[in-house]
Amino acid sequence: MEKKVIKKDALAGIVKKLAGQMPVYAPVQDQDNVLFKILEQGMEPMLDFGNTRNAPKNCFFPQAETMLKYFRTERGRELAGVVEGAPEAVLFGVRPCDARSFILLDYVFDDPKYKDTYYMERRRKTAIVTLACVHPPSTTCFCTSVGGHPMSSEGADIVLADLGDRYLAESLTDKGAAILKKFGDLANADDAALAKKKELSEKSEKEIKSIIPGNDIKPWLDANFDNPFWDTIHKSCLACGTCTYLCPTCHCFDITDEVKRDGGRRIRSWDSCMSWLFTQETSGHNPRTSQKERWRQRLLHKFRYFVDNYHAIACVGCGRCVQYCPVNIDIRKIVTDISKL
């Protein structure tokens, strides 16, 4: 695929011009946070930022979405149809850890047996432009411990690397090549640009200082469902769900019907395994009676069950759950402690 260079001061203008042609999700400043939002007139795409507070999974798997609508007739309720299909779009400025999360979400929503048409419709029609991490965005990053890399191209259609005075832009897919053409008449990348990227890639990997034994704990998890260790990790948890709602790979949801006199709609919305309602049955029984069971489920899902099903850890090492937990529960410490048992 093509490899181009973009002048440093030209990229923001290119992105804003593209936003005039199609929906572009981009990181923007929102008070004290950087968030992914649809770029509107007057908004500036962020190019120099650590990472967004919200994961970009919302672009494919919205926090709340209408799945279908129905209305009442003399014969009863009739289906009015699903919501209209998603438009062609661009998801710009995604960090490599978040781009890799889409591959993990694809395992769930594009399973050969159970394909989620809502997710896949958006996924197929959206080009992902990754902004490589020349330097780790945060001290809480641990992508290399779970199969990632700060300058990985996994999950991306285009990868941008900041070379200092310019960006190296590499299209990796046909979808990416089509979007790169919309960037305008760009110069071809020279050998110096490619060599610079390789040098930065090696340096960025060494700058990841947070290393955990993410691949080593599964045997212990397989054999220690009732180990007393589980009593030690949950006591400060508030069950707020911050770790799950900000996580790029958490994908649990609930489905509810909003019924009005003349019809209604079916809505899918995010849910959290940290909530006591998550596993409450109609009878009132709840098999996970405390945060102990819920935290155990969170760890087992990411480092055991997902590995069993898809041969990958359901964590990309973005560090959001560590950075924003109000009581400082650190999944890195929990995994490290398990490895010492």
Image (cartoon, rainbow, N blue to C red):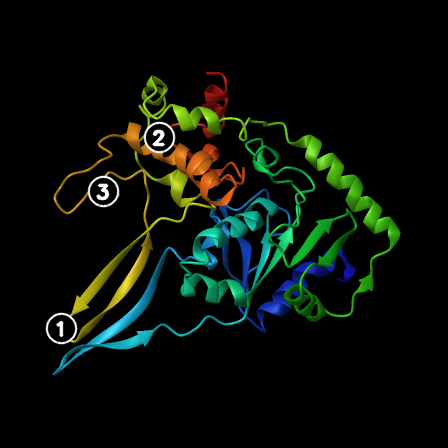
Residue type indicated by callout 1: Arg
Q: Please tell me whether mark 1 or mark 2 is closer to you in this view.
A: 2
* Quadrant of residue 92 within the rendered picture: bottom right
Image: 331 above or below 172: above
In what quadrant of the picture does the N terminus appear? bottom right
Mark toward the start of the polypeptide (2 vs 3): 3
Q: CA distance from mark 2 to mark 3?
A: 16 Å
Q: Residue at x 55, y 27 (%)?
A: 212
Q: Residues within 10 Å of mark 2 (few under 14, many from 20)?
A: some
Asked whether residue 272 appears in the rendered view, the answer is yes
Query: Along the line of sight, which residue is nearer the eye, 162 or 263?
Result: 263
Q: Which residue is mark 2?
A: 296
Image: 207 above or below 169: above
Q: Which residue is mark 1?
A: 261
Of helix, strand and loop, which one carries label 2?
A: helix
Residue 21 horizontal/vertical position (percent): 59, 74
Look at the numbered discs 1 and 2 and tell me whether their residues touch, using CB distance below 8 Å: no
- Marking on residue 277: 3
Of helix, strand and loop, which one carries label 1?
A: loop
Q: Residues within 10 Å of mark 3 (few under 14, many from 20)?
A: some
Q: Please tell me whether mark 3 or mark 1 is closer to you in this view.
A: 3
- Marking on residue 70: none
Q: CA distance from mark 3 to mark 1?
A: 28 Å
Residue 116 horizontal/vertical position (percent): 41, 61
Residue type indicated by callout 3: Leu
